[in-house]
């Protein structure tokens, strides 16, 4: 028998139509082998379910199997992988099944059953209740193919370690064509894989081969398979990339370290020999004056007078490279740049801290050596503390103390000690930050002889200066004629005196010179407890810090690092002076924002009031244009409906009432009318006396303008029927109303008091409908009647022919009521942008009785004093408020 080794994983062949052209590449190798059930392996072969052997193979006739997916040439032992194959069947296969008697029925029934049958579980599935009643994979290792007794080759080892010869069987119908089954192989070597299915009473097997590689075990001392230096260092050792990743950075780090050390050494040597700090005396230009505290200029004409006025001139200034610098003058008989001087200058130039004045340079021309440092425009701390015009809350004071502590801590960390620390050597820059000055370069600062004939010679040689300097010296130095090099404890003691100055804002020297015996020191400040920025946040802690700093035992005095921590405990807010000022500004800004918001809200409310007033006088679109400064052109409207009403007997009512009562009556009446108007799509044009004019269909065009006016008019009549005159309750209140529909022209007339006016014959006709009407009745023209009639929901009654001034005989109508509200609402919902008043009940008949008014109650025909009407341009025109009326 032969073992077929497929080189191509995607071969598809039909045993009934197989020829050489369909096999792309097949390699035949002859070796002892056993196929599935001891049968010769082909691409795929078909057998009957009963007694399958190499002699009774049957044609597949349209049943096809093929592998699909990525080709797998090898797998690792004990590693799971997926095997995918496809099963398809043509109509010829189902005809073949029926012809062989494998299915009782025709081939269409066989196909439908096979593609739609719901299969039971694999354990009970048979050819009678499931189409694909067996689908699984078999594996045949080469080591087991020599056994002629093996009827089913294997092994298959499941997840629990049980040994099987094949995978568990799967079942389904033919709608499931693509199958993917998980597989794990354990026996290393050349292995055959067989996909095996059973369909109806036919079975088919599809064959391929692959290589099972030995499993890799990290730690067995053998680097094989997929083991690499990355996945198993114990077997394969370190990768060269890892070795390089370790060695190269170490080498680079070492080289970088050597380079950095060399560069630092080079820079130090360069800085050591650099003489750019030496300044030519001619490059220093004198300032225009000497600046006093807070940066103002003080006259030097009489230094004694300055002291008498308690104004401290804290330093001499000059101009170097267009910048103001502080100048320290030192008299020297001789001076040379030695190695020690270079070392001291280099140490000073290397310092970089926010609380230290920068060293600018020095002019070393004898007899005067100038030391130039950064200038602080706010003056010294002594100047600021002595100036009562400068308000300092405790946030500022604690911030000053913290700035000094930070600067001194930095100096001490660089093994540089001040030795002359006092409030006059603590300067304040324009950001209210303390910067310490007058430190370092002791050789350069050493005075050979007292300076003579300079601006401050009187103060330099005065007892006041000596007393001021002596108060900062600790007791252990007072017995020295020549002060030794400074120590850290010296600066700590001086810092205690500065803390007292900050708390009291007073000169630290004794007022009584008799007390100045060398052992005197200022008393502890008396600090009151309280809340707010004017009180020390922790008085007892502050006093303890002063005691701690001037302790007679030098070893017990704290370091500046410790002082920094104590100051944080005293003032946990950690606010700098700038932060404090910014906090105050932020608070002011927030208050200002609230105030602006309130004023803006008030302005918006006033604007809304103005808008409401403006919109009550003019239509909103017209008002918006006028407010924007735009012109409003007259506009014609082809169809609209105008309503007029008038109070019957108003002259009699007015004659029997006071003016206040008349105003109250009209206000109550028209307020009621206005409330009703809000329910309808109408616009009130104007109210003049007892006359009331309303229009619908403009300025917003409305297809149902006649309905809106009719509904509104019925509401007004209903309200007037129940209206009671407050001061004349016995008087029957009546109005008459009239409407007419037609075209008009609308526009704004006037500048000082612009009026929205209507022009056209429609206005005059609507006015005549009102003036010729009757009490509590609505007279409408024939045009309006035709429009309302088209809706079919209004009750109207013909009045007959009447003589209308300027129009002749006209047939008019009484609007009695309305009906079929549901139908109205239904139609209204279909009309875009219109509304229908729902509050008035159906009127089946005229609820109002005819009321005959006596000649006393009937007012005269209203004159057209407020109406302007243009009639074909033939009549004489009189322009009044917003209607034009022409009398024949």
Image: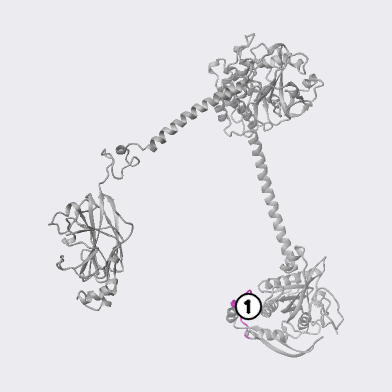
841 drawn magenta: yes
Q: Please count the marks in the image.
A: 1
Q: In this picture, which residue range is highlighted in magenta? A: 828-844
Q: Position of residue 861 (x, y in %)?
A: 82, 82
Name which quarter of the figure residue 431 lies in: top right
Residue at (62% x, 9% y) in the render: 480
361 drawn magenta: no
Name which quarter of the figure residue 411 lies in: top right
**Secondary structure character of the magenta stretch overall:** loop
Q: Is residue 246 left or right of residue 365?
A: left
Task: Give whichever of 302, 164 is nearer the camera.
Answer: 164
Q: Which quadrant does the N terminus fall into?
A: bottom left
Task: Give whichever of 286, 656 is nearer the camera.
Answer: 286
- Among all residues in the image, which is located at the extreme right? 876
Q: Position of residue 85 (x, y in %)?
A: 29, 62
Name which quarter of the figure residue 440 lies in: top right
Residue at (75% x, 68% y) in the render: 617
Q: Position of residue 65 (x, y in %)?
A: 27, 65
**Disc 1: which residue:** 840
Q: Residues within 10 Å of mark 1 (few under 14, many from 20)?
A: some
Q: Is residue 362 visible?
A: yes
Q: Which quadrant does the C terminus fall into?
A: bottom right
Task: Give whichever of 631, 700 is nearer the camera.
Answer: 631
Q: Is residue 765 left or right of residue 65?
A: right
Q: Is residue 141 left or right of residue 388?
A: left
């Amino acid at each position: 028998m032969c073992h077929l080794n497929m080189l191509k994983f995607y071969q598809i062949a039909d045993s009934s139509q197989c020829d050489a052209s369909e096999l792309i590449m097949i390699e035949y190798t002859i070796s002892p082998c056993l196929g599935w059930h001891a049968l010769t392996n082909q691409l795929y072969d078909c057998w009957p379910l009963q007694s399958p052997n190499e002699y009774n193979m049957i044609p597949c006739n349209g049943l096809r199997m093929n592998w699909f997916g990525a080709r797998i040439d090898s797998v690792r032992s004990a590693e799971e992988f997926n095997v995918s194959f496809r099963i398809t069947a043509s109509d010829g296969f189902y005809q073949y099944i029926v012809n062989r008697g494998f299915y009782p029925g025709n081939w269409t029934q066989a196909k439908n059953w096979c593609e739609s049958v719901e299969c039971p579980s694999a354990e009970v599935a048979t050819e009678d209740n499931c189409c694909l009643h067996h689908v699984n994979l078999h594996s045949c290792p080469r080591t087991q193919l020599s056994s002629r007794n093996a009827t089913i080759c294997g092994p298959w080892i499941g997840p629990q370690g049980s040994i099987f010869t094949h995978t568990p069987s799967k079942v389904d119908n033919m709608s499931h064509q693509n199958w993917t089954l998980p597989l794990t192989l354990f026996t290393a070597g050349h292995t055959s894989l067989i996909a095996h299915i059973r369909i109806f009473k036919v079975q088919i097997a599809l064959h391929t081969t692959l290589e099972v590689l030995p499993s890799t075990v990290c730690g067995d001392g053998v680097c094989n398979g997929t083991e690499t230096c990355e996945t198993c260092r114990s077997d394969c050792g370190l990768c060269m990339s890892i070795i390089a990743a370790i060695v190269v950075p170490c080498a680079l780090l070492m080289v970088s370290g050597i380079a950095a050390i060399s560069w630092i050494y080079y820079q130090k040597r360069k800085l050591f020999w650099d003489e750019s700090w030496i300044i030519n005396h001619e490059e220093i230009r004198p300032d225009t004056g000497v600046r006093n505290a807070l940066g103002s200029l003080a006259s030097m004409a009489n230094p004694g007078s300055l002291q008498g006025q308690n104004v401290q001139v804290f330093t001499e200034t000059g101009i170097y490279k267009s910048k103001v610098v502080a100048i320290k003058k030192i008299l020297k008989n001789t001076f040379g740049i030695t190695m020690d001087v270079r070392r001291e200058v280099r140490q000073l130039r290397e310092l970089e801290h926010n609380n230290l004045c920068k060293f600018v340079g020095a002019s070393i021309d004898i007899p005067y050596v100038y030391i130039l440092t950064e200038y602080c425009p706010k003056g010294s701390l002594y100047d600021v503390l002595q100036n009562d015009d400068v308000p300092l809350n405790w946030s500022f004071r604690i911030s000053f103390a913290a700035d000094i502590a930070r600067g001194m801590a930095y100096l001490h960390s660089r093994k540089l000690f001040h030795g002359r620390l006092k409030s006059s050597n603590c300067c304040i820059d324009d950001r209210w930050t303390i910067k310490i000055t007058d430190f370092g370069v002791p050789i350069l600062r050493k005075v050979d002889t007292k300076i003579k004939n300079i601006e401050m010679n009187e103060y330099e040689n005065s007892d006041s200066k000596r007393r001021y300097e002596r108060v900062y010296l600790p007791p252990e130095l007072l017995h020295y004629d020549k002060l030794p090099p400074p120590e850290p404890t010296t600066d700590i003691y001086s810092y205690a005196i500065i803390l007292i100055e900050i708390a009291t804002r007073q000169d630290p020297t004794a007022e009584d010179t008799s007390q100045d015996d060398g052992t005197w020191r200022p008393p502890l400040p008396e600090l009151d407890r309280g809340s707010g920025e004017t009180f020390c946040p922790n008085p007892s802690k502050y006093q303890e810090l002063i005691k701690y700093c001037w302790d007679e035992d030098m070893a017990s005095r704290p370091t500046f690092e410790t002082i920094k921590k104590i100051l944080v405990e005293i003032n946990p807010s950690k606010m700098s002076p700038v932060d404090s000022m910014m906090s105050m500004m932020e608070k002011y800004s927030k208050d200002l924002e609230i105030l602006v918001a309130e004023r803006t809200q008030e302005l918006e409310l006033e604007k809304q009031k103005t808008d409401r007033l403006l919109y009550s006088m003019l239509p909103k679109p017209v008002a918006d244009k006028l407010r924007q400064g735009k012109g409003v052109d007259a506009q014609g409207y082809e169809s609209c409906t105008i309503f007029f009403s008038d109070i019957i007997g108003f002259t009699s009512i007015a004659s029997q009432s006071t003016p206040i009562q008349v105003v109250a009556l009209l206000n109550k009446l028209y307020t009621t009318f206005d409330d009703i108007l809000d329910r309808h799509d109408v616009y009130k044009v104007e109210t003049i006396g007892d006359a009331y004019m309303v229009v619908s269909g403009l300025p917003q065009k409305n297809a149902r303008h006649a309905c809106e006016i009719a509904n509104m008019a019925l509401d007004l009549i209903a309200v007037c029927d129940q209206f009671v005159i407050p001061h004349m309750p016995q008087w029957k209140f009546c109005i008459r109303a009239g409407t007419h529909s037609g075209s008009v022209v609308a526009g704004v007339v006037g500048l000082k008091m612009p009026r929205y006016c209507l022009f056209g014959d429609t206005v005059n006709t609507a006015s005549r409908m009102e003036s010729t009407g009757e009490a509590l009745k609505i007279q409408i023209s024939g045009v309006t009647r035709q429009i309302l009639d088209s809706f079919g929901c209004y009750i109207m009654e013909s009045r007959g022919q009447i003589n209308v001034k300027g129009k002749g005989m006209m047939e008019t109508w009484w609007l009695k009521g309305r009906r079929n509200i549901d139908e109205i609402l239904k139609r209204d919902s279909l009309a875009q942008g219109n509304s229908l008043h729902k509050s008035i009940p159906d009127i089946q008949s005229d609820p109002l009785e005819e009321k005959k008014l006596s000649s006393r109650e009937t007012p005269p025909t209203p004159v057209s004093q407020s109406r302007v009407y243009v009639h074909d341009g033939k009549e004489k025109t009189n322009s009044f408020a917003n209607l034009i009326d022409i009398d024949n």
